[in-house]
Amino acid sequence: MSLYKQEKLAGWGNYPVSESYVLPVRDAGDVAGALERGTLIARGLGRSYGDQAVNDHCYVGDCTKLNRFLAWDAAEGILECEAGVSLEEIITVFAPRGWLPMICPGTKFVTIGGAIANDIHGKAHHIDGSFANCVLSFTILLADGRVLTASRTEHADLFQANFGGLGLLGVILTARLQLRKVETTYFKQQSIKIRDLDHMLEALDSYDADYNYSVAWIDALAKGPKLGSGVLTLGNAAQLADLPPSLRKEPLKLHKNSKLTVPFFLPSFTLNNVTVRVLNRVIAFVQNSSKTFIHYEKFFFPLDAIHHWNRGYGKRGFVQYQFVIPETNGRQHLAEILTMIAQSGCTPFLNVFKRMGEGQGILSFPFKGYTLAIDFPVSKALFAFTPKLDAKVLAAGGRLYLGKDALLTETMFKAMYPQYEEWVAVKRKYDPEGKFSSNIGRRLGLIGTSTLHA
Ligand SMILES: Cc1cc2nc3c(=O)[nH]c(=O)nc-3n(C[C@H](O)[C@H](O)[C@H](O)COP(=O)(O)OP(=O)(O)OC[C@H]3O[C@@H](n4cnc5c(N)ncnc54)[C@H](O)[C@@H]3O)c2cc1C
């Protein structure tokens, strides 16, 4: 078994921090050795915001060394790779050949294992669905040491339960993925300044038929007649013939590696309602770009321009609160939720609003409706506020994204995801002793307690 390193480990939000024993995973043997001694959870690039890939006083299997490409079918665009390969690595190798990942979240620094475990979604969820849609099959190492291939026809229950399964069913070792053929790595984009919530929902309705990608930034400090104001960005993949001559010279251009970084945690007082109001104006200006053609890097991953931007929230960390609610009565519920947030005193920042299509895996987050993601710096006020917000989201028929959550209680989770029992039945079938465990798994009552045998 590889040597482990005791580390203070957290998710992207740097909250909560817990002591974990980090073990590099290079093959199935590394995991089997650890499982004889205690519980384990796989970890990718740590871009989940909360306690998804930490395991207090137990093992965390760092899968980022499982990063080999195994096979490539250039005719069909099917890639077989290890699960620690990142979207960034796939883009770097395959974009110049005219292929991009089918589903891109807001950062390219996520692994395939992480993308499956959270069943991630992008700006075209209402058209493309979530990550499950581009996975043909995967291999997974189970608690009893077997490695099974799971797909829609083989061990279909294991396949479905892994999308949104938070890594709690085993360690995904490899996956076969469908990539998307592209003529260029550019997108044709339009930005619309949004006056208020009615305008936002009308704009989404009227432009949805013409654009595959849509995402809005909302000013969550705006109140009264400006409630729901922001900028809506719409886009489609640009065809070669669309591009102006200057871009046509290098239509499959790759991103450059960013050199900008936040080198240390900024002081916690840096972000307050005053600085957020100023930053909101800057975001509104940048988002409302007049450029028609925009490179995938800026279109999909604007936040990747600054490494470690999460340190900007200071050592106290932050929580990303993302919920989805049904479209029925959605306008009224959104107005009430936005008003609660604006009055909470909790400094909402980076608020992203999207429309979602139908959902897939058992514990997958998306369903048809509206989703809003808000970053909140950690504070006492936040701990008092989120239970009220949870109750409001639940009353609206909604639920939270578990891949970002850090605060939900077991009772609230079970009310939001009543189908959890179906998932637990699959967990019992493939991991009856709860060998794969994590902080979020225990917090939400998806497994028993953590154990480490000396
Ligand atoms: C800036 C930013 C923007 C984002 N935008 C979006 C977005 O638009 N849409 C969206 O859906 N998400 C978004 N996310 C969240 C991110 O896509 C997910 O949290 C993703 O799962 C992170 O992948 P990771 O490799 O970092 O996994 P980690 O965070 O390390 O782990 C995530 C989960 O995957 C499991 N896991 C990791 N590897 C394996 C494996 N080999 N086998 C089994 N389980 C495994 C872990 O146990 C854990 O439960 C964003 C995150 C950031 C930081």
Image (tube, rainbow, N blue to C red):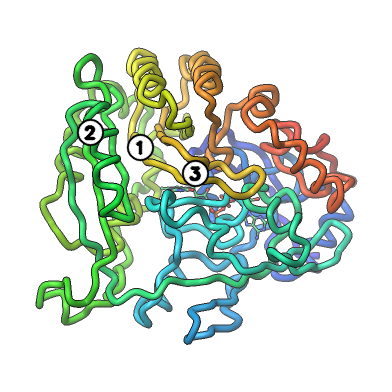
Residue depicted at x 48% and y 86%: 75
Q: Which mark is residue 353?
A: 1
Depicted 159 relative to depicted 339: above or below? below
**Side (left or right) of 69 relative to 162:** left
Which residue matches tag 3? 12
Could you tell me how far apart the alpha carbons at marks 3 and 2 are, in whole angstroms? 25 Å
Which residue matches tag 2? 230
Quadrant location, the N terminus: bottom right
Quarter-of-image position of residue 268? top left
Sequence-first disc among 3 and 2 = 3
The residue at label 3 has a CB less than 8 Å from ligand 1: yes
Depicted 161 relative to depicted 195: above or below? below
Residue depicted at x 18% and y 47%: 191
Sequence-first disc among 3 and 1 = 3
Q: Residues within 10 Å of mark 2 (few under 14, many from 20)?
A: many
Q: Nearer the viewer, mark 3 or mark 1?
A: 1
Residue 193 image offset from top left, x and y in percent: 16, 37
Q: Relative to the observer, which residue lies in front, 349 or 402? A: 402
Could you tell me how far apart the alpha carbons at marks 3 and 1 are, in whole angstroms? 20 Å
Q: Residues within 10 Å of mark 1 (few under 14, many from 20)?
A: many
- Report if the CB atoms under discs 2 and 1 are less than 8 Å apart: yes
Residue 167 image offset from top left, x and y in percent: 68, 51
Residue depicted at x 48% and y 79%: 77
